[in-house]
Amino acid sequence: MENIILSIRNLNAYFGDSQVLKNIDLDIFKNKITSILGPSGCGKTTFIRCLNRLHELVPKARVEGEILLNGEDIYKMDTMIVRQKIGMVFQKPNPFPTMSIYDNVLAGYILTGIKLTKEEKDRIVEDSLKKSGLWNEVKDNLFKKGVFLSGGQQQRLCIARALAMNPEVLLLDEPTSALDPISTLKIEELMIELKKSVTIILVTHNIGQAGRVSDYTAFFYLGELVEFGTTTDIFTTPKHKKTEEYLIGKIG
């Protein structure tokens, strides 16, 4: 039996009166990559923003239901702790423009006021940049601004920034949609390497990418979870017509 790290039960999410997620029940398995697939506007991004409590930052947004991280209800935890344990990388690379590469990696600590010694900082920066596959490219320029890097490097810097907080889960919201094919391939290889130490939830429009990197796939349609299973099963023998239509490009 796979280890469950996140258990989502009867999750409903709203923007004001508009319901964007309907009764989502889903288990996320530890040290696996789970892809969230579905057409634009089906609730994929809202879903992962509920998982680290970003959704509630939107005015009039609210959530009902239960999200358990290792059995603990995230809505009863301090939001800062939730966001340390469940890190997120967004669609467009967003290094902090005024910060050096070094400080970008440490941004989570800087912004939350966690004090570190020089040795701790150096270790976290090197370790996180190595994990994100960026260390050899930037180790001689750590005190240059992060915005001087290429798009693909900036995205790996954002992954390093998330990894620096030692999260248990990493949410990736279309992390390669703004990148060229070579950078995309590097990030896909990186994801497969990273799942040894962190659980990954990947929102992607790229069906091929989901097929290449993910162990499990959830298909969302109009705010509902239509189907969930191993990526192999979903891609070869989908149980629902909607899933099949999406995978062959009839809806999207």
Image: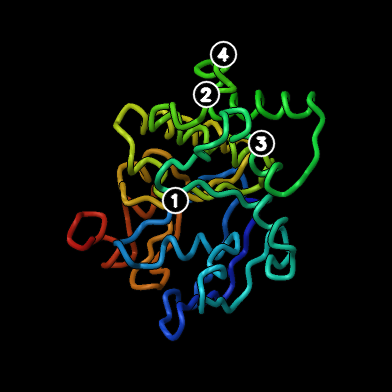
Image depth: mark 2 or mark 4 in front: 4
Residue named by callout 3: 106
In which quadrant will I find the C terminus? bottom left
Closer to the camera, 182 or 192? 182
In the displayed image of the protein, which residue is found farthest to the left?
250
In the displayed image of the protein, which residue is found farthest to the bottom?
17
Mark pair 2, 4: CA separation = 11 Å
Label 4 sits on what residue type? Asp
Mark pair 2, 3: CA separation = 15 Å
Mark pair 2, 1: CA separation = 20 Å
Circle 3 residues within 10 Å: few <14, some 14–19, many ≥20: many
Q: Which mark is residue 134?
A: 2
Q: Are marks 4 and 3 in contact (CB under 8 Å)?
A: no
Counting residues from the start of the chain, the first of labels 2 and 4 encountered is 2
Q: Is residue 220 left or right of residue 99?
A: left
Circle 2 residues within 10 Å: few <14, some 14–19, many ≥20: many
Label 2 sits on what residue type? Leu
Q: Is residue 36 above or below residue 114?
A: below
Q: Which mark is residue 173?
A: 1
Q: Which mark is residue 165?
A: none
Mark pair 1, 3: CA separation = 21 Å
Q: Secondary structure at mark 2?
A: loop
